[in-house]
Amino acid sequence: MAVLLLGELNGSELAIDLTAKTLTAAQDLGEVTVLCASDSCSPAAEQASKLQGVAKVIKVENLTFAHGLAEPLAELIVSLSDDYDHIVGPASTFAQNILPRAAALLDCMMISDISGIVSADTFERPIYAGNAVQTVKSQDTKKIITVRTAAYQAAEEGNNAPIEELSKEIENAISGWVEDRVASSDRPELTSAGIVVSGGRGVGSVEDFELISKLADKLGAAVGASRAAVDSGYAPNDWQVGQTGKVVAPNLYVAVGISGAIQHLAGMKDSKIIVAINKDEDAPIFQVADYGIVADLFQAVPELIEKLDET
């Protein structure tokens, strides 16, 4: 079985964590070729070639593939698809914008957000906010798959796979790039951070959410939020953790003022250690927490920050 893995790119760089975790899953399906495509992806191709388990890297550099436009990238995948049984990518905004289009062009079903591989044609994926696992079997000749990266460990480096440079001309009359609006931050990226500190509706306001940010900065953590906090305007949408937000699985997850609705738990319950701070001792978050602090967050969090300052 041959597998084409769509490398996730941030400009000319590889999103190494997402790609490496997807690679771990893809290796269970066969020999893996990583596709890197943009207007300047040589650094990304070099990074991909170092990942253990990569048999080959295909590098396609063309202005048509700049800025991650989904339409030409989907066409590119289709043009390469004859040599592959499986086409995979991370369950990220980038890949989930591209692979369903490729699936439509190939007239194949889209198998999204898998967390397990049973066989070459059978996969497991979480449903009902992660409370059940659905087994999906596809009879399509091509399997188009996105992988829930939180379910896999990242492949390590130490490889030196060959890089094949292809010249591909794809006509794109459907879409065009206008501008990128990217929020810049010194904090780790939410989905790949080792530590995440999240705030909920209990934080109470945009101003008080700064307390969550201060704790995160002390821990070198990413900042997350519950949907209730996002809907209330306390935090931006791209901080949302949960069923309709981002799925995270850090080594440490600190939930502050979060009650623990099932939709939020679906996005963070695979965290290695969960710490909950909530003044309601009956909050559902305590049922999944490894450590629970029943306290007013406006007392507990400043005390925690103070203790961290002393270390």
Image: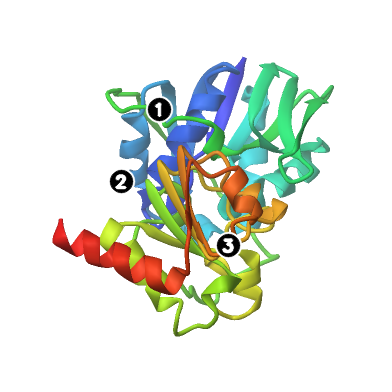
Asked which secondary structure carries label 1, the reply is: loop
Q: Residues within 10 Å of mark 1 (few under 14, many from 20)?
A: many
Q: CA distance from mark 2 to mark 1?
A: 18 Å
- Name which residue type carries label 1: Ala
Q: Nearer the viewer, residue 42 or 167?
A: 42
Compared across the picture, whether 299 is left or right of 70 comes to left
- Badge 2 is on which residue? 43
Compared across the picture, whether 268 is left or right of 231 comes to left
Q: Does 90 appear above or below 208?
A: above
The tag earlier along the polypeptide, 2 or 1, is: 2
Q: Residues within 10 Å of mark 2 (few under 14, many from 20)?
A: few
- Tag on residue 258? 3
The tag earlier along the polypeptide, 2 or 3, is: 2
Q: For marks 2 and 3, give the one nearer the viewer.
A: 3
Location of residue 182 in the rendering, given as x and y in whole percent from the top left corner: 45, 71
Color scheme of the displayed model: rainbow
Q: Which quadrant holds the N terminus? A: top right
Location of residue 86 in the rendering, given as x and y in whole percent from the top left corner: 65, 26
- Badge 1 is on which residue? 155
Which residue occupies 42% across, 20% down? 53
Q: Which quadrant holds the C terminus? A: bottom left
Which residue occupies 75% across, 20% down? 122
Asked which secondary structure carries label 3, the reply is: loop
